[in-house]
Amino acid sequence: MTEHFLEEDYDLAHLEVTPGQPGGSKPVDLPILHGTMGPPVLDIRLLYSETDCFTYDPGYTSTASCESKITFIDGEKGVLLHRGYPIEELAERSTFLEVAYLLMEEDLPTEEAFRWFNQSITLHTMVHEQLRNFYSGFRRDAHPMAIIVGVVGALSAFYHDSLDIHDAQQRLIASHRLIAKMPTIAAMAYKYSIGQPFIYPQNDLSYAENLIYMMFATPAEPYKVNPIVAKALDKILILHADHEQNASTSTVRLAGSTGANPFACIAAGIACLWGPAHGGANEAVINMLKKIGHKDRISEYLKRAKDKNDPFRLMGFGHRVYKNYDPRATVLRKACQEVLAELGYKHEPLLELAMELEKIALEDSYFIEKKLYPNVDFYSGIIFKAMGIPTSMFTVLFAVARTAGWIAQWLEMIGDPSQKIGRPRQLYTGHTQRNYTPLDQRKP
């Protein structure tokens, strides 16, 4: 395939394709699609039928798999927009449930709309009582992510009245149920792992407050949620709510393209998020800090991080998408400082180490030149640690937040008339056709 050239005033891209068959090269014109923001896109839907050629794009890093109006990212400029609103403004001025509404409903809610949405979520926070028995089937030392993958997938066995994806009302009910029940399911997974009784949600608490309450309250005494901690958690939920077509979101869309019910689709997204290369980054930050161990060893590990031949990597710095500063990290850095001050963790060794590492790395010429700034995972991991949340729950809380984005993406996919069942192709490099040899005639 020869090089093609794109110009802004061209409607078509002209390619000369040589398929390796008699007849030589074949010209083909591909439409160029323009979004409201971002680079133009080559429409290759007819490429195979016209040229007998596929495209090869491992990881789909240069492929737009769908059209979307939800989230826009400009990694070079450090921009993240939800429905056009900058993430910094949403995190500072909005709430997680407002952002969830925005992602699903295309605009920020009016006061009346938000009262309705907030009430709907609040009234769906409890789970079917028989789900308590479902938890008892897991070992006490089961990873909380393993538990919530199973429990969320099992919701389809308890809520039969919201499984018809072609019914708009059922889609709405299922969407609200998933957003509402995720904190309850997550908190129950935590309580089960530490052998404490489950705590029911309270209708007078906010979304973030309820999550904290269900995780840390006990029946033995009253529990008051710290408002600064709750505010920081709400920011974390907002900052993780959606992030364009990442691995887990693409998984939700792929599962949804088959017509699977919404509970199964979200369970698939949770399973994908579980991977350490995706949702486990903030957990990796804490593990890295434990490995460094003390402030006196920071220079040693920074030197190792600069050595390409050393397997050690500085976790929580830089980002695959953002080639500049992660805009979410800017917001969370302030929240992190507020939480540490509120909870009095100025002299906690691990958190003290994290702050010193941040300071040194931000002043180091190598990291400045490479633009390896602290990302959202660095600060969220520190906040979770300060809150007393175990590392095994970090990715679970990520899943709680991302459910809002998954739901919005799933709803958009269902309503897209051009959406088809996902079916990636491949570049086959195995054996050509060969004949079967009987077992007694095969040679070593």
Image (tube, rainbow, N blue to C red):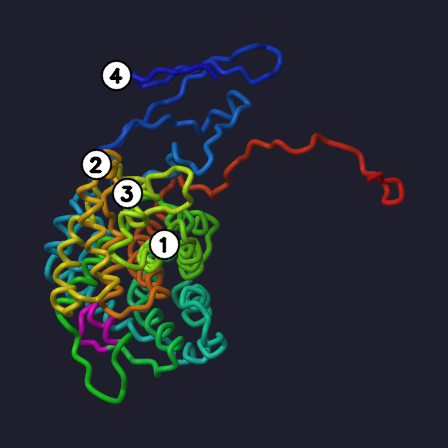
Marks 2 and 1, how far apart in space?
29 Å
Q: Which of marks 3 and 1 is nearer the N terminus?
A: 1
Q: Name the residue under label 3.
A: 318
Q: Which of marks 3 and 2 is nearer the N terminus?
A: 3
Q: Name the residue under label 2.
A: 365
Marks 2 and 1 in Cβ contact (< 8 Å) = no
* Residue 147 placement (x, y as % from top left): 43, 68
Q: Is 212 included in the stretch rendered in magenta? A: yes
Tally the numbered discs. Answer: 4
Marks 3 and 1, how far apart in space?
15 Å
Q: Earlier in the sequence, mark 1 or mark 4?
A: 4
Dividing the picture into quarters, in which one does residue 71 lie?
top left
Marks 3 and 2, how far apart in space?
14 Å
Q: Which of marks 1 and 4 is in front?
A: 1
Q: Earlier in the sequence, mark 3 or mark 4?
A: 4
Q: Earlier in the sequence, mark 2 or mark 1?
A: 1
Residue at disc 2, secondary structure? helix
